[in-house]
Amino acid sequence: MARVLTLQGEDFPRWYQDVVAKAELAENGPAKGQQVIRPAGFALWERMVEEVDARIKSTDTDNASFPLLIPQSYLSREAEHVEGFAPECWTVTHAGGKELEEHLVVRPTSETVIGEYMAKWVKSYRDLPLKLNQWANVMRYEMRTRLFLRSSEFLWQEGHTVHESYEDAHEFTLHILHEVYRDFMENVLALPILAGIKTVEERFAGALNTFTCEAIMRDHKALQMGTSHELGQNFAKAFGIQYLGSDGKQHHGWTTSWGTSTRMVGGLIMGHGDDAGLRVPPKLAPIQAYVMVVKDDAATVEAAEKIHAELKAAGIRSRLDKRGDVAFGRRAVDAELKGYPVRVEIGPRDLAKNEVTIARRIGEVGKTSVSIDGVSKAVAEALELGQQALFDEAQARLDSCTKEVSTLAEAIEAAQSGVAKVPWDLVGVEGEKQAAGEGITVRCL
Amino acid sequence: MARVLTLQGEDFPRWYQDVVAKAELAENGPAKGQQVIRPAGFALWERMVEEVDARIKSTDTDNASFPLLIPQSYLSREAEHVEGFAPECWTVTHAGGKELEEHLVVRPTSETVIGEYMAKWVKSYRDLPLKLNQWANVMRYEMRTRLFLRSSEFLWQEGHTVHESYEDAHEFTLHILHEVYRDFMENVLALPILAGIKTVEERFAGALNTFTCEAIMRDHKALQMGTSHELGQNFAKAFGIQYLGSDGKQHHGWTTSWGTSTRMVGGLIMGHGDDAGLRVPPKLAPIQAYVMVVKDDAATVEAAEKIHAELKAAGIRSRLDKRGDVAFGRRAVDAELKGYPVRVEIGPRDLAKNEVTIARRIGEVGKTSVSIDGVSKAVAEALELGQQALFDEAQARLDSCTKEVSTLAEAIEAAQSGVAKVPWDLVGVEGEKQAAGEGITVRCL
Ligand SMILES: [Zn+2]
Ligand SMILES: [Zn+2]
């Protein structure tokens, strides 16, 4: 079999580039740092959106849409925020053939414009909590870019909420971190997460605290997969988000913001991919079963169509490949590269025995013959075992590169040498503050 | 009952503004012509996206994502296109604190950038048809704007395809018009459609032909709800989209593009809304049944929760309102304003008789008592009848303001006085050309 990709062990970054290109996931856009997300890559993102959106909705957060362009003056209202984002902005100066009175920036994030509207909509404690989310494109100027991981434009979801108290806002920030982000990443993406807190230097511009979900990639480096920010009253004060409390007095709200982006596609690639290409966890996979004819004679195609229909009826996301004009071996290598969890291969020889071949890309890798009657069951089982196997593999990697500690003091000590894993419960709010005071991010570095 | 809205008969545009504001659908953004789509408005759009996206996918079109910013030089490659769009562009001149070598425009539409990539991806006739779609934001500078109907930034889907021949491209343009757009608009939005062809002056910049879906609003004006363009070989030539044919020779592809946008939300409002507010067709409605407690005593709330759960189990999109601290009358008026097709009202008096009240906003308007056991069935029936009633009402309006003709010649004559309705089959490709030659758009003007 011809080698399609650079080996991971040889050059991990080049392997990544190869997978993105050869699996036709994305390529560079015409202007600096932009990306074109191709159908195979976008299908992965669409599934992420579907799963994350359902979890966000389950927190009673509503989707909405705010403008792409933000007046420059909005950014300046929160001092740390403008300092953090101004150097990264893309600026619209002209429209309709003339210069604009006030220049507008393409949103690098929407705290400011959403803050402006929240201030109008929030009047009384009865309006709280106000929980909004948007799926949107944002832009930040980047000198060095990598597809999905760091690009000038990316797609993301940004949640923005206002609460009555510090406690409510704090609890919601953590609820999103754990019940939305970590739950999705561990149970769908099959990537165990280290939940950490960012140091003063790394935290979001204008935030009190930034919490992060980090996953360990196959090169043993950590990748930030999502963040949840406690913004305290900074934005509420800058934008005048005030409410009449049940005590009859005016109070500033407590806001949060939180986001996950197309960077998760990069995390999926580097967290599970191997020398043969992508490996997509079944619960995420847009294509879970890839039904292939070995030859395209009428009987084989008919059998394949029947099996494809049966798999779909069983709730399995199946795709049918009945091309006889592309060599079987080439199609099989391409299916490995694209990371489909299970292939169902159907040829005249199998059919003569009333069987098909199940080829597993994950879990107990390899091929098995099963009777045609048992295809749906065999595929469903392979998908379930494969999902668990990918998670176990990632968990073992995470364990091997982190040091377990049982007290906060130990954790802070271990972190001095760059490695620490602390049970979240152990840390708590006080622990977070203390760790942050010591300048520590709890992650595998 | 206090009047919440301007009456339609008094001032239709002001009624529209009132509904958009009072039902909390959208408001103006900070910069000129921008819009903020609020949760109630965005939920309508999300349902449109869900339904239209499923229909697009059923045509074997794949979703993808192309960059927001397009180099100015791209626009210039197709002469008519640059002439049509240049005056409407929003331009990014600076990024990362310095001026860009080439200015970039915020996409007004993506034919040019997608054409550039299609040229790379299409090599042989085996790569055709290539069918792509993206859900994206676009911007066009507008002097006079109206929320949803005409805004500087809007959300849309834009499909872009390349085909081997004129016939394939033509057929696909019409397939999208009828099987995707018209099917969605008639069967989900409950708005009967006049499918027409744009005159030379009105057609898309660079297109051979622009087909349009027009619906008749309650003020008897037509609104363009979606368009499908045959681009001929204009963009293929400008961007070098060429393929090696089965004849061993190089040919230029034939491209199409087609779009629907958040303007459809405006069409929904004006196509069905009445003096009490929105009326949302059940098949679209994010909230089909609104379960309300009359009082929030424990027994009533418990019964309401049970009915809400039962409706959801029956596949009905239900929302529960168990607020006892807002007057029932005010909540009922608000539910009318928001256009929920059916309310299920539950109070102690109903419960004593083991009944609830079904209030219909559409169809046979009014209230009926039904036994608690029969709620799901009664709601499902009311939704089905309501969907049909809204469609019938819109169809009657369309019939009353169009003139039926049976030949193309009659149609062209009738169109001179501004009114014509021609069966599509009668027109055909030749008819379209002839009608276009006479400068006629087949719509209710
Ligand atoms: Zn929680
Ligand atoms: Zn058709």
Image: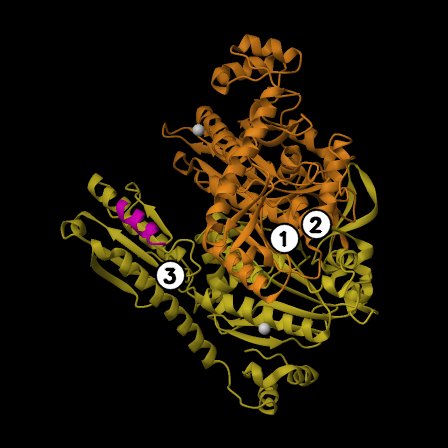
Chain colours: A orange, B yellow
Amino acid bearing label 3: Ala
* Viewer-closest of A422 and A131: A422
- Place residue B60 in its image quadrant: bottom right
Whether ligand 2 has any atom under 8 Å from the Cβ at mark 1 is answered as no
**Residue B136's disc number:** 1
Q: Which residue is mark 2?
A: B68
**Residue B276's disc number:** 3
**Residue B271's disc number:** none
Residue B269 appearing in the image: yes
Spatial separation of the CA atoms under disc 1 and disc 3: 33 Å
Sequence order check, earlier mark of 1 and 3 = 1
Amino acid bearing label 1: Ala
Question: Residue A12, how many percent across, how many down?
Answer: 74, 32
Amino acid bearing label 2: Leu
What's drawn in magenta, residue-wise? B306-315
* Viewer-closest of A359 and B168: A359
**Quadrant field for ligand 2:** bottom right
Sequence order check, earlier mark of 2 and 1 = 2
Q: Nearer the viewer, mark 1 or mark 3?
A: 1
